[in-house]
Image: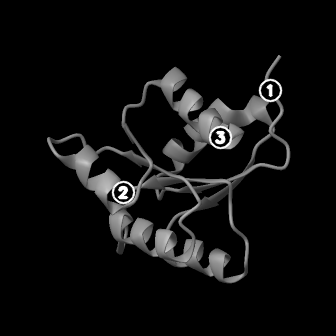
Amino acid sequence: MDEDYSGKQVFVVDDDLPSYQLIEELLSGKRISLMHFTNGTDLLAEFGRGNKPDLIIMDIQLPGADGLQLTRKVKSMDKSIPIVAYTSYAMTGDRERCLESGCDEYVSKPIDLDRFVEIVIRYLKD
C-alpha cells in the first residue's frame, strides 16, 4: 500500500504536459496535492497569494524564463521550500549550476523513476 501524503502540496513547474503527466502518474498513489504551472509568472503569482508548497519540482528550461533565475527568486522569498531541478540539461556542470542557484536536488531527463519518487518522498517526510 502506498504511503499517504494527504496535506502535502507539490508545485510542478514544467511547460511540457507529458512530463507533468509522468510526475502525476508516479505520485498518484501517494495522495499528494499537485499544482501544475507552465511558467514562472503563474508560480510567482501563486506565491503572492500566500500559497506555498512543501516542495517544488522545477523544469530549468521554461518559455520566457530561466528556471535557475526563478529558483533564485523563490529562494529569496522562502529559503525553506526545497526545489528539485527536473531538467533535460545533462551537460557537464549543469548539476552544479542548478545546485548553485539554490536547487536542493538535481534530476535529469529521462529520469530514473524509482530514484525520482524516492527524492520527492524524502523531502515530503522532512
- Dot 3 alpha-carbon crowd within 10 angstroms: few under 14, some 14 to 19, many 20 or more: some
Name the residue that disc number 1 marks: 3
Q: CA distance from mark 1 to mark 3?
A: 15 Å
User: Which kind of residue does numbered mark 1 sit on?
Assistant: Glu
Q: CA distance from mark 1 to mark 2?
A: 29 Å
At mark 1, the secondary structure is loop
Residue 24 marker:
3
* Image-quadrant location for residue 56: bottom right
Q: How many marks?
A: 3
Q: Earlier in the sequence, mark 1 or mark 3?
A: 1
In the image, residue 7 sits, relative to residue 62, either above or below, namely above
Image side of residue 124 versus residue 1, left or right: left
Residue drawn where x is 17% and y is 46% of the image: 93
Residue drawn where x is 53% and y is 66% of the image: 79
Which residue is most to the top? 1
Q: Are marks 1 and 3 in contact (CB under 8 Å)?
A: no
